[in-house]
Every structure is written in C-alpha cells, then in structure tokens.
Amino acid sequence: MIQNAAARLVFNEPKRAHVTPLFISLHWLPLAARIKFKALTLAYRTITGSAPSYFHSLLRVYIPTRHLRSNQLVQTQTDVHQMIQDRMKKIQEIKHSVEMRKRNTEESVKIFTDLIRSIRRCQSKQLKMMEEQQKAAEKQAEDLIKELHQEINELKRRNTELEQLSHTDDHLHLIQYAK
C-alpha cells in the first residue's frame, strides 16, 4: 500500500516494519479510517452549510419516526443532570441564606450589646444625678430644719421672756420690750 510505504520512507524504516506506530507519530489515520473521516466531515459540513451547495441535494438528514432508547436515555441523563445542578444551586442558596442569617444575628447581638451598655451608662449617670439631687435636697432640708429649730428656740425664748414680763409689775419694762 502506498500510505504504508510513504510512512516507512519518512522514517527510513525497513519494508517489514510495523506501520501503526509510524502512523501515530505522523498523526495519520489508516486508509479505511481516513475515508470514513472524510465522508463524515463532508456530511457534517453539508448539514451545517459550510460545504458547496450541490452537496445539499445529495444528502438527506435522517429524522427518526420514533424516539430511540438512546435518545430517551440521553434525555433522561440530561434531566437528571439538570436536577442535580438545580439541587446544587438550592444548596448554595440555603448556605448563603444561613450565612446571611448568621451575620444578621451577629449584628443584632452587637447592636443589643451596645444598646445595653448605653442604657447602663445612662442609668449610672441618672443614678449619680438622682443621688446628688437627693443629697442636695437632704442638705437643704437639714438647713431648713436647723433654721426652723433656731426660730423655734428664739420663739421659746421670747415666750419665756413674755411670761416673765407678764408676771412682773413693772409696766415700763413691758412697754420697752414691746418696742
């Protein structure tokens, strides 16, 4: 065969050398496979429209009248693959949702912790202010009570003096005291 001889000539191999490894090295197909490849390539180019137009009239596309098992199997495999992809997408969405909930929970905890700190700080300030007001009110009340005690003592002293004057017979002294 000419193809075998050409491969042996390229590699300078003897007449009895096996040609298959030579074909592989040259990226050549055996003659029968090459004819089949050329025919299939020409058919594909005719169907896709890249072959000359006169081939279209020579070639008819086969459309089966019933569904073949292999087509159904391929369709079922495609459906299963799509279902797997849908489930994987759903898993990713659920994971994302869980992650978002976790972040929201962490943010909420941080906000509530800050709010509690703020309330405690305000409570502390308010308690200090109330204690200071209480002390000021107590001091004011003590001062007022002290003042009232002094007035009471003064009034008691005057009352004692008036009683003493009322028992005296010296009216002049009584008039002078009244002024």
Image (cartoon, rainbow, N blue to C red):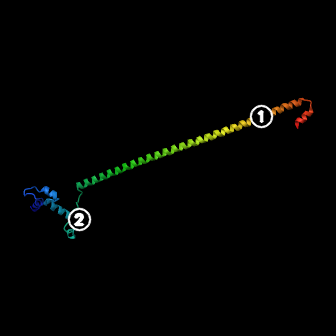
Q: Residues within 10 Å of mark 1 (few under 14, many from 20)?
A: few
Q: Kindly check if marks 2 and 1 are in contact, taking CB atoms under 8 A apart as contact.
A: no
**Left/right of residue 133 with respect to residue 33 in the rendered view:** right
Give how far apart the Cα atoms at labels 2 and 1 are: 123 Å
Amino acid type of the residue that numbered disc 1 sits on in the rendered structure: Gln
The circle on residue 34 is: none
**Residue 41, x across and y down, in percent:** 20, 63
Name the residue located 22 percent from the left edge and 70 percent from the top edge.
53
- Mark 2 or mark 1: name the one nearer the start of the chain: 2
**Residue 119, x across and y down, in percent:** 56, 43
Residue identifier under label 2: 47
**Residue 87, x across and y down, in percent:** 34, 49
Name the residue located 55 percent from the left edge and 44 percent from the top edge.
118
Quarter containing the C terminus: top right
For the residue labelled by badge 1, is the local secondary structure a helix, a strand or a loop? helix
Q: Nearer the viewer, residue 138 or 43?
A: 138
**Left/right of residue 84 with respect to residue 177 in the rendered view:** left
Amino acid type of the residue that numbered disc 2 sits on in the rendered structure: Ile
* Location of residue 157 (image quadrant): top right
From what the image shows, is residue 6 above or below residue 148?
Answer: below
Q: Nearer the viewer, residue 179 or 98?
A: 179
Name the residue located 92 percent from the left edge and 34 percent from the top edge.
172
**Residue 50, x across and y down, in percent:** 24, 67
Residue identifier under label 1: 150
For the residue labelled by badge 2, is the local secondary structure a helix, a strand or a loop? helix
**Left/right of residue 66 with respect to residue 142 in the rendered view:** left
In front: label 2 or label 1: 1
Q: Residues within 10 Å of mark 2 (few under 14, many from 20)?
A: some
* Location of residue 121 (image quadrant): top right
Name the residue located 90 percent from the left edge and 33 percent from the top edge.
173
Number of callouts: 2
